[in-house]
Amino acid sequence: MNNYMIVAVGWVIGQAIYATKKSWDLQRANADLSFRDALTLYFSKETAAFAFGFLIFCAALFMLPDFINMDITREDLRNTEVVKWKKYFIYFLRGISVVFGYLCQNLGYYLFGKSEKILEKRSQVDGIDLPKR
């Protein structure tokens, strides 16, 4: 399977696990709510969060080739250690892509929330009024 497909499938699985967990939390908080209704409610209320997660996913796919090149070349086949390392990394990529799919929304909130706080502090120092949220 292509490295991009590995990350894409893992992300979808991670997002499905995340949505199921959040829907289960909604269902446990409200005894009258069925799981299907909780899932529908969660998807309807968290559309922006899924769009944000998708953009984080697209950014990760855009940056992936800069950090790893998992193509096995003829030169690699001459050195069994390199081939073995690349195979193990592909296995690791499968697992980490599911974790990334599960955590990408929270990771994005954390990263962009930090930068937002830095901008707010800097604007206060410089006397710039930012629009209120």
Image: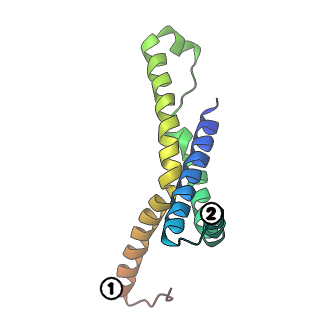
Q: Is the C-beta separation of discs 2 and 1 under 8 Å?
A: no
Q: Going by the image, does 32 lie left or right of 122?
A: right
Q: Is residue 101 above or below residue 116?
A: above
Residue situated in front as seen by the camera: 102 or 113: 102
**Amino acid type, label 2:** Leu
Is 110 located above or below residue 130 in the figure? Answer: above
Q: Which mark is residue 39?
A: 2
- The one nearer the camera, 113 or 17, is 17
Q: Position of residue 72 (x, y in %)?
A: 57, 20
Instruction: Identify which residue, 105 or 27, lies in the foreground.
Output: 27
Q: Is residue 121 left or right of residue 68?
A: left
| Percent x, y of residue 43 | 64, 65
Residue shown at the point (46%, 17%) measured from the top left: 84
Closer to the chain start, of discs 2 and 1, is: 2
Q: Secondary structure at mark 1?
A: helix
Mark sitting on residue 107: none
Report the mark closest to the observer, 2 or 1: 2
* Residue 23 x %, y %: 56, 63
Question: Element under label 2?
Answer: helix
At 61% from the left and 62% from the top, the residue drawn is 35
**Relative height, residue 80 to residue 97 (above, below):** above
Quarter of the image where one finds residue 54? bottom right
Taking the view exactly as shown, the residue that stands out farthest to the left is: 125
- 10 Å crowding of disc 1: few (<14), some (14-19), many (20+): few
Position of 13 compared to 124: left or right? Answer: right
Q: Which residue is mark 1?
A: 125
Q: Amino acid at mark 1?
A: Val
Q: Position of residue 101 (x, y in %)?
A: 53, 50
Q: Please say if 75 is above or below 43.
A: above
